[in-house]
Image (cartoon, coloured by chain):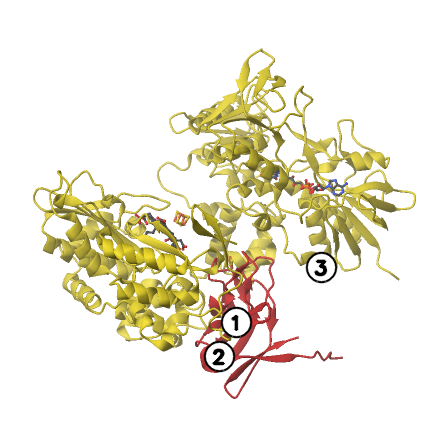
Amino acid sequence: METIIDIEWVLACYVDDVPENGGVCMKHGHEQIAIYNFSRRGEWYATQNLCPHKQQMSLSRGMIGSAGEACEPKVACPFHKKTFSLLSGECLSGDDYKIKTYPVKVTDGMVYVGVA
Amino acid sequence: MSKPTIIVVGNGMVGYKFCEKLVAKSSAFNIIVFGEEPRRAYDRVHLSEYFAGKSADDLSMSSASWYADHDIQLHLDDPIQEINRANKTIHSLKGVTLGYDYLVLATGSSAFVPDIPGIEKEGVFVYRTIEDLELIKAYAFNAKNGAVMGGGLLGLEAAKALIDLDIKQTHVIEFAPRLMPRQIDAAGSAMLQSKLSALGLNIHLNKSTARIAGDHKIEALQFNDDTLLAVDMLVISAGIRPRDELAKLAGLQVGTRGGIMVNERMQTSDDSIFSIGECALFDDMIYGLVAPGYEMAEVVVAQLIGTDKAFHSFDMSTKLKLIGVDVASFGDAFIAEPACRTIVFEDTHKGVYKRINISNDGKLLLGGILVGDADAYNMLLQTVNNKIALPPNPEDMILGLRGGEQSEGAGVMSLPDDALICSCEAVSKGTICGVVNDGATSLDTIKKCTKAGTGCGGCMPMVKDLLAGTMKANGQYIKNVVCEHFDYSRQELYDLVKINKLKNYDLVLDHFGKGDGCETCKPLVASILSSLWNDLIVKQDTIQDSNDRYLANIQKGGTYSVVPRIPGGEITPEKLITIGQVAQKYGLYTKITGGQRIDLFGAHVSDLPLIWEELIDAGFESGHAYGKALRTVKSCVGSTWCRFGLHDSVSFAIEIEERYKGLRSPHKLKGGVSGCIRECAEAQSKDFGIIATEKGWNLYICGNGGSKPQHAQLLAADIDSKTLIKYLDRFLMFYIKTADPLTRTATWLNKMEGGMSYLKNVIINDSLGIAEQLEEEMQLLVDSFHCEWKEVVNNPALRSRFTHFVNAPGEKDPTVKFEGMREQVKAVW
Ligand code: SRM
Ligand SMILES: Cc1cc2nc3c(=O)[nH]c(=O)nc-3n(C[C@H](O)[C@H](O)[C@H](O)COP(=O)(O)OP(=O)(O)OC[C@H]3O[C@@H](n4cnc5c(N)ncnc54)[C@H](O)[C@@H]3O)c2cc1C
Ligand code: SF4
Ligand code: FES
């Protein structure tokens, strides 16, 4: 059985506020959420902005890219280049970290992030 | 039916590893952990790195949410005080009473503190927990002389820590006639002692302490021979004492000299209670290392999930992560003639001692000791453990093949599949090669799939060799490629981009790469593009390293630094005042850098354009401190003021810095110009250094400071300024075109076939016939210089990228915090 979770869609910004193949940081109450415009693939992702490695508010400023044959989308923290999957939030550099991911929806040139 | 409950007493390294291994194999248990320490299990093996700046969090074995993620109940700061074996319950200090089906005692050990009069005095410490280290650090602040009691493995590590804490005189007191008596022999100890003395340690052997003197705090140690040593603090490292008090109270069998007795299944005298790690006594032995503890955890997990596994005595070979002196002992280190034959190599000049013990028939390696150079340790240990037949000249194993080199990779590949490579995580050669055969091509993947190398890390060189060896055996060509997205070296890619006139990253990826790129190839291509076309890097900001993307270096806490260019280190009073005013206005910390200019630290990302706007108005340009680009050309004051100066070194330094400013290269570039041979500009430690002579200038190239300092070498002597710039153009452009990424000029030269004489030929004699082309290419770059910050300041679209919150552009990151220090600010993070 599928569970239906209520997702609240929060307006983050306009599409062209986010650089191509790059990220920005959105403020949501006390949370900071990183939003990525993976324009090379026409995809959008969002994760927590805090890098769990040294607790730096930095992931939105990281470089995105892909890993492996399956082209898993990922972001690399600018501080020490730990990488995280944009799909699962798992750390791909062999450490035991996991970051939060959020769904993203784009309509009419506007970017919405789903917070549960 | 509810799940059986396992209670783990002790959340140390082994207790944690037990949980990790159990949840990986089974979810059939309800796991509850009690720890006495206030924090989650951390890596005690690397405890000393706490002094080198690692935080408690860095040392932690797991993330904060790990226990919850795996449904493990964790009670920290709450030691178990009583076990009721009849009711199968435990009782904790904070009053929790819980029933168990199985109990795992992983209570570890504590430091053994000898019963010496005065031992309770202030200033006497042990070295076991993060809290111990915090106390030592605080006390060391006011101490001048310190001593460590115990010259064993841990004692020497503690002594090194005291030196690092700036204790002026550090002493090591050892009761035995030699250092590390359990690991090395007298000759090895003598060599170690002379090396340690050179590091500033005072070693006292054959000393037993009678009394700790002092009023309420320690002031001196008094020895049995009636001598006295004045010290302000003492760290005791005289061995460990297994924590068996809880077991004893519960009536479990313990050894006469301590330790909870276990059988080869790690069961105590009560078969629903197991004991593992440093508290467990197996076959009359306490294993004071982490690897056997992990093996014990594995054995218990096997019992619980219904498979069978037994613990056998464990190899106690060790390599020290000491102090800047390699020490290792392996196998049977002490066996002596006539039970074996020994080969000893001793070099008192370099401080190297090596001993190997081989079987009388010359076929097998039994054990040995290495001091001063332990590079061969991994291979020797493997040779002992796997009973590998020795080569006809076993001395080669410690002396290397003299004449004709043998690659280490071949050695590792010849090991049997079941050879244990990572003893912390019990990973065999077969497992590692297996994941490489299944497609792993990086160390990260191997670590992730097998956990090899995630413990002490000592096996990483072998893992690396196995990776290379296996790939080679599979016919996979290990080429020096950029990353998984490009099958080319940097030099190949540079040529391809140039020939095809590609101007942006996506085009390069479409033409020559695959996938979507990554943090390795993006900045590399970015650097190639700017070396070729010198386009504005912020036009493709998302392929730049963070520092290049924001045209500033990112700092701890997420703020940035601002470094305006100050060519040659010369600056007018007016400009100095501007810097001061800007720093004041934006609350920045200011410091004179090692490159003769001024760094302003702590700028919020949204303040960067405002700060630069003011600096640019005052005539400053970007200093490119953030880029792999020309940094500074240092100068000495030279002939304009200095009585020894031969030429005007300041003017020449400024001319050169202006010429090459902003030049993007494989790594950063630095230069220096000195007005005479006294060399006050330290030019010979730079990528290019210029020194005035009676007749002109000497040009030196390929030097650097940094972690592996190397002096620059003379390229040409007594040349005039014009020739010098011509040579520099050729040299720099040749470097930019051919060096691997992130390779400084010195390393580039070191790897170059033919070395300096080849390079001289290319630059001075134009042996490749490309000199003119190199000069033209350089001139193009010089002519297309632009100040990146000026472009940003004047371009509203680019400016708008410099915000922290996309949906609240004015707001600064609230997590950034500063505190005061010497009338300025510093980052809190
Ligand atoms: C600010 C400064 C220290 C200071 O307060 O004096 C400094 C600060 C940094 N240095 Fe440095 N280095 C500074 C002079 C030096 C010097 C001395 C010199 O230039 O004469 C050296 C040794 C000389 C040399 O490079 O050969 C030096 C060798 C390094 C190295 C090692 C390079 C190597 O090849 O081994 C690194 C690491 C790297 O570049 O990969 C480094 C990296 C860094 C970084 C960029 C680390 C980082 O990525 O955050 C630091 C950035 C601080 C910041 O946020 O602005 N810094 N660094 C100096 C700035 C000079 C300037 O005006 O631009
Ligand atoms: C400075 C230092 C350097 C070292 N270097 C190396 C090295 O290079 N290589 C190597 O192999 N080993 C090294 N070791 C040894 C290694 O750290 C130990 O072998 C390992 O930590 C043992 O793990 P353990 O879980 O058995 O014990 P511990 O890590 O000591 O954990 C036991 C835990 O149980 C807790 N506890 C005790 N009683 C109770 C109770 N009643 N209730 C609840 N909790 C309790 C303790 O507070 C402790 O947190 C080093 C140790 C130190 C101190
Ligand atoms: S030496 Fe350089 S890189 Fe290291 S801390 Fe100092 S400034 Fe930073
Ligand atoms: S802070 Fe993100 S990798 Fe270190």
At 37% across and 64% down in the image, what residue appears? B548
Are labels 1 and 3 on one chain? no
Label located before the other in sequence (2 or 1)? 2
Ligand 2 contact, mark 3 (Cβ < 8 Å): no
Query: Residue B31: percent from the left, percent from the top?
Result: 78, 54
Q: According to the image, label 2 marks what residue?
A: A41
**Between tags 1 and 3, which lies in front?**
3
Q: Kindly indicate whether the residue at mark 3 contacts the one at mark 2 (C-beta within 8 angstroms).
A: no
Q: Which chain is red?
A: A
List the single residue furthest toward the left.
B695
Q: Which chain is yellow?
A: B
Q: Kindly indicate whether the residue at mark 1 contacts the one at mark 2 (C-beta within 8 angstroms).
A: yes
Q: Classify mark 1: residues with Cα within 10 Å, few (<14), some (14-19) or many (20+).
A: many
Q: Classify mark 2: residues with Cα within 10 Å, few (<14), some (14-19) or many (20+).
A: few
Q: According to the image, label 1 marks what residue?
A: A73
Q: According to the image, label 3 marks what residue?
A: B68
Q: Is residue B402 left or right of residue B255?
A: left
| Disc 2 chain ID | A
Q: Secondary structure at mark 1?
A: strand
| Disc 1 chain ID | A
Amino acid type, callout 2? Arg
Q: Nearer the viewer, residue B225 or B766?
A: B225
| Mark number, residue B442 | none
Residue B151, visible in the rendered structure = no
Q: Is residue B8 left or right of residue B141?
A: right
